[in-house]
Amino acid sequence: MKKILFLILVMMLVITGCGGQKQESNISNQNNETKENNTSGDNSDSSQKEQTQGFEFEYHGVTIPMNVDAAPILEQLGESMDYFEAPSCAFQGLDKIFYYSGFELSTYPQGDKDIVSSVNFLDDTVTTKEGLYLGASLEEVLDVYGNDYTEENGFYTYTQGDSKLTFVVENDVVESITYSAVVEGVNE
Amino acid sequence: MKKKILINVAAICVAILILMFIQRLLMPKYMTEIPEGNLVEEYYDEVKKHDVIFIGDCEVFSNVSPITLWENYGITSYIRGSAQQLIWQSYYLLEETLAYEKPDVVVYNVLAMKYNEPQKEAYNRLTLDGMKLSKSKIGAIKASMMKDEVFITYLFPILRYHSRWSDLTQEDFKYVFKKDTLSHNGYLMRIDTKPVHIIPKGKKLPNYQFGENSYYYLEKMTKLCKDNDIELLLIKSPSVYPYWYEEWDEQMVNFAKENNLTYINFLEVVDEIGIDYSTDTFDGGLHLNLSGAEKFSLYLGKILSETFGVPDQRDNAEMKKIWDEKVDFYYAMKADQEREMAEYGYLKSYGAQAQQMEAE
């Protein structure tokens, strides 16, 4: 009897104690792990910026970093021209796309928040913070962003912090510009 | 001495039983949230006599109704689908299925060809945790694990879920020994409607070529079917999002041609099927609702029946008895969903989206 009690006690200790720091425990909440620190507490634009250290897109004075809570950004941007949402195969929450003049902003769900996953340029009315636009030349891209890129079939990708900035170049002309978050399972 | 040995053996047995109970208690039940998590496991309770087996991701478990196939063509079928089922998981699920039964036709939805590597532990769990321990499960685990995952946590999920002890809910206790059946032979029913409003354009990709790993498992699947004298039908289900690129379609056309298989992209025949994306989808075009799934199944059933010669089993008394019960369950769930729609304006008890709406 004593042995049984001892075994049970050991098992309970193993089960409750071996985790140490509490791991994410529910499959449905696993997305919550990635950037909780970025999105909790002060949601102001400036505090989010300090934490990301990645690429940022600016539109009419609104700074849009990747991997931050989209709510304050969307509030500043105002109502989008169009909107698309896509529930994932399994997880609660929705991947969302907000269409604005010249670009689309995508988000992914994390707990009860929507996190910025990408900004994709739709036309040449918008530019990167450094002045690059659809229709610019490859030479201009390299002049502005340098040579620290990876290239695959005309996709020039720069990585900074937890974000990427990708230029799709065809015949030396930039055909597509996308900011994206580097997060497991997102933008892949 | 003998008594001492017996006591020790008893102590070990009790400890194992308690551990098994705790493991069951701690594992997510997927009853009221993420019902997709139950699909793989539900198959084991089935009478395994199916002429058609579907494998793939949500584009099969949301879009194909085995009951419609039965009612209209007498086709007995089962969907071994799961959320974001990757092709190596499809292969091992098929391998496992063939250990139980030998269908005439296997239908594989090719969307997952776009994933050449494991994507996310959470999705792996939704497919792998439900599998019974077997050589196939071990193969599936090894092929699916992300870099930072630990193999043993799939064999002993208590090592993965131990920290859930403080998050246990009533559901965990209620379904610790027996879960409700949520699907209709692997089909997850949704009767609500959310029309297609906008379809995002497919973003340019640096490389449209499906990966070597994807092809490796597609070839293995093809060989597995040929070795077992089973027809393999490759399909692209008529979901309008995620975007299905022409370059991808071409590769599937070529693969089918080279391997003497049939590949059908049903996005090309949506008008013929009669799918109306303003009424036949519950989430803006990703998945079909019941109305859409029945239309698609009606169309697909004709192909299975006429082109592949899948037999009509409606005169088989044993099959009829089994399927009559399934049909009753199907229409009972349909009626219950209609009641919820009338009462609440949305599906309160079915699907993750309904849960979210309720929370709001």
Image (spheres, grey):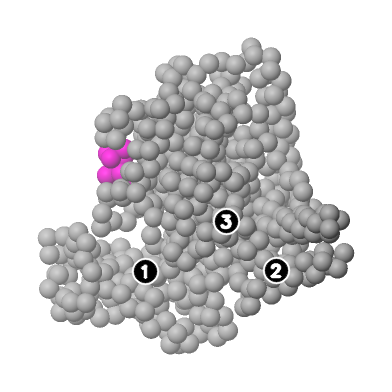
Q: Position of residue B281 (x, y in %)?
A: 53, 42
Label 1, label 3: how far apart the Cα atoms are: 32 Å
What is the spatial separation of the Cα atoms under label 2 and label 1, in whole angstroms? 39 Å
Q: Identify the image quadrant of residue B333.
A: top right
**Which amino acid, by three-letter code, is at mark 3?**
Tyr
Query: Tag 1, which chain?
Result: A
Mark 2: secondary structure? helix
Q: Which quarter of the rendering shows the N terminus of chain B? A: bottom right
Q: Which residues are magenta?
A: B244-252
Pointer 2 local density, CA inside 10 Å: few below 14, some 14–19, many at least 20 = many
Q: Position of residue A108 (x, y in %)?
A: 49, 64
**Labels 1 and 3 within one chain:** no
Q: What's the residue at 53%, 38% (across, down)?
A: B96
Q: Is residue A126 visible?
A: no
For this rendering, which residue is in front, A44 or B253? B253
Name the mark on residue B36.
none
Point out the frontmost of discs 2 and 1: 2
